[in-house]
Amino acid sequence: MFNSPILLDATLRAGDYIGFTFFTGYMSMLAASIFFIIERGTVSDKWKTSLLVSALITFIAAVHYFYMRGVWLETATSPTQFRYIDWTLTVPLMCIEYYLILKPAGAKSGMLVRLILGSLVMLVAGYIGEAVVIEQNVLWGIISTLGWALIIYEIYVGEAAKVAAASNNPVVQKGYNVLRWFTLVGWAIYPIGYMMLPGNLLHGLVEGYDPTKSSPVDLAYNIADAVNKIGFGLVIYTIAKGATAEEKALARA
């Protein structure tokens, strides 16, 4: 069902569900970018940067999905390198979003450094294990998990969690809690896919899975990317709109 022949004419065919999600992925994320840019003019100045970063996240992903779709249609192989280039740019930007929404409540730059460091360790180690030395993917997976754990610690226990709890803005607190769930639960699909590599814990879960070829893992990654990136941006948008409305109400009082 998931293994397709090489399509030399690079044409999306009926029944190519993975190709379809590459196509809808870049179209939906491009649309989200346009939406965030337009709506940026409707929020107060201190939230404009947050919406700009949301637009950058989805735009960068849209460009990469355009190229990943081309790789898929031409070769029917998983575009692992493009995925990691995308993630290496967009995941740190998602970490920056945490800092931006908490900065008015007193977040320090050290928090931002720890989040970005965790994301880079997670992604660089993951790439090495998935594309460079696959035979050592368990070791590199452990290192990658440590980077993810640093992010989770920071947003649930560390400075980010403490600043959010001390914030007197209920809109920010509620939005922050939703963002944490995206990071904890929404990102879970990625380590699950990684653990299906040869020799890893879930290898064999999908019959005939080869990380260099077509697989349902690509389908899951594509859907998860769109949901996580667009959803993350929509939460930021909700925070910005809610906080702006509150500021206007206080100004009128």
Image: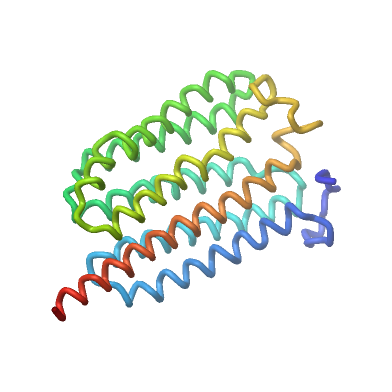
Is 85 or 23 nearer to us in this picture?
23
Location of residue 204 by image quarter: top right
Direction from residue 138 to residue 49 in the image, left or right: left
- Please state the horizontal and vertical placement of residue 217, each as a whole percent of the image: 69, 41
Is 58 or 205 nearer to us in this picture?
205
Above or below, 123 against 26 in this view is above
Name the residue: 64% across, 52% down: 68
Above or below, 58 against 123 in this view is below
Name the residue: 34% across, 55% down: 174
Placement of the C terminus among the 4 image quadrants: bottom left
Name the residue: 63% across, 35% down: 193
Location of residue 192 by image quarter: top right
- Please state the horizontal and vertical placement of residue 89, each as a whole percent of the image: 44, 48
Direction from residue 18 to residue 236 in the image, left or right: left
- Please state the horizontal and vertical placement of residue 251, each as a whole percent of the image: 15, 77
Direction from residue 158 to residue 194 in the image, left or right: right
Above or below, 149 against 84 in this view is above
Name the residue: 36% across, 46% down: 95
Is 194 or 214 nearer to us in this picture?
194
Direction from residue 171 to residue 64 in the image, left or right: right
Is 43 or 123 nearer to us in this picture?
43
Above or below, 185 against 238 in this view is above
